[in-house]
Image (cartoon, grey):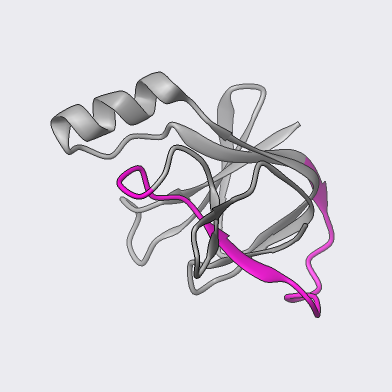
Amino acid sequence: MTDVYRNLRRAGGCWSVREGGRVVAHVPEIALRDVRLVVQPGGRAACLRTGVRSVHAVARGSRTDFAGVPEGAVEVGYSPWHAEVFTVRPGFHQVLACRLIVFTSNGTAWALL
């Protein structure tokens, strides 16, 4: 399984790719299939308490070929200050899993639910 999360510390931002608990790449874009969107409640609580961001929310799935944002995809994201889970944008309706998610070079994520 592959975890993907937004890395805000690298210049310009990128997506960090973690496999087996280790970061194996930093990429501008990537796609995953059969995805679970995971938020660790303890990490979120610490973030809310301290105001300091940490890696506690990831998209977990299998890597797949990147072919651009598919038709019918909706934007998804996560903010610890808005919700306990990943949400569809706009509207902030919860989303826990999706068939496909595409992480783009401009920092957005698009999912087929």
Magenta residues (range): 62-82
Q: Name the foreground residue: 84 vs 20.
A: 84
Toward which corner of the image does residue 28 lie, by quadrant? bottom right
Toward which corner of the image does residue 80 lie, by quadrant? top left
- 112 up-or-down from 69: above or below: above
- Residue 15: x, y in percent? 52, 54
Q: Residue furthest left?
A: 50
Instruction: State which quarter of the image contains the N terminus.
Output: top right
Q: Is residue 49 left or right of residue 101?
A: left
**Is residue 67 rendered magenta in the image?**
yes
- 65 up-or-down from 38: above or below: below
Residue shown at the point (38%, 19%) measured from the top left: 42
- Residue 27: x, y in percent? 57, 57
- Residue 62: x, y in percent? 81, 42
- Residue 58: x, y in percent? 56, 39
Kindly report the secondary structure that dominates the magenta region of the rendered protein. Answer: loop
Residue shown at the point (73%, 75%) measured from the top left: 69
**Is residue 92 rendered magenta in the image?**
no
Q: Is residue 9 left or right of residue 52?
A: right
